[in-house]
Image: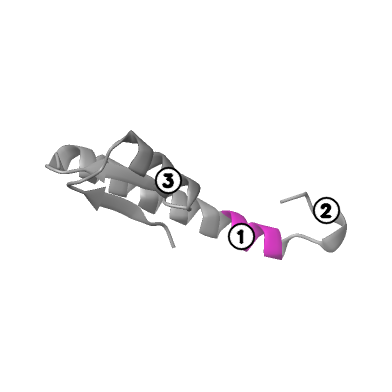
């Protein structure tokens, strides 16, 4: 699961801490909806890509395995 932190009280230090803790991205309020949409499209695209990659890794023969 990808997590996007959205806060009205953030600063650079908070953003760095959130990313180190595993957040996918960090946004400050007030939100710019166009930027939020771009970010969410990116999250959805990466999630789909990861799912596709996982599918094909499971389908290939054991001798053709590539490192993760």
Tell me the crowding category of disc 3: few under 14, some 14 to 19, or many 20 or more residues within 10 angstroms, Cα based. Answer: few
**Between residues 14 and 32, which one lies in front from this camera angle?**
14
Q: Nearer the viewer, mark 1 or mark 3?
A: 3
Tell me the crowding category of disc 1: few under 14, some 14 to 19, or many 20 or more residues within 10 angstroms, Cα based. Answer: few
20 on left or right of 44: right
The residue beneath circle 3 is: 17
Q: Nearer the viewer, mark 1 or mark 2?
A: 1
Q: Earlier in the sequence, mark 2 or mark 3?
A: 3
- The residue sitting at 49% across, 46% down in the picture is 20
Q: Is residue 58 above or below residue 23?
A: below
- The residue sitting at 69% across, 58% down in the picture is 57
Q: Which residues are magenta?
A: 53-58
* Secondary structure state at the residue bearing disc 2: helix
Q: Earlier in the sequence, mark 1 or mark 2?
A: 1
| Residue 13, x across and y down, in percent | 37, 38
| Image quadrant in which you'd find residue 34 | top left
The residue beneath circle 1 is: 54
Q: Is residue 42 visible?
A: no
Q: Nearer the viewer, mark 2 or mark 3?
A: 3
* Secondary structure state at the residue bearing disc 1: helix
**Between residues 52 and 50, which one lies in front from this camera angle?**
50
| Residue 29, x across and y down, in percent | 15, 43
Q: Is residue 58 visible?
A: yes
Q: Tell me which colouring the rendered structure shows.
A: one colour
Can you say which quadrant of the picture contains the N terminus?
bottom left
- Could you give the CA–CA distance between mark 1 and mark 2, rounded to whole angstroms? 14 Å
The residue beneath circle 2 is: 64
15 on left or right of 47: left
Tell me the crowding category of disc 2: few under 14, some 14 to 19, or many 20 or more residues within 10 angstroms, Cα based. Answer: few
Q: Earlier in the sequence, mark 1 or mark 3?
A: 3
| Image quadrant in which you'd find residue 14 | top left
């Amino acid at each position: 699961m990808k997590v996007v932190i959205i806060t009205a009280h953030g600063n650079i230090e908070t953003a760095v801490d959130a990313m180190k803790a595993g957040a996918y991205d960090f946004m400050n309020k007030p939100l710019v909806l166009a930027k939020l949409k771009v970010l969410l499209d990116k999250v959805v695209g990466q999630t789909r890509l990861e799912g596709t990659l996982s599918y094909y890794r499971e389908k290939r023969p054991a001798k053709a395995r590539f490192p993760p």
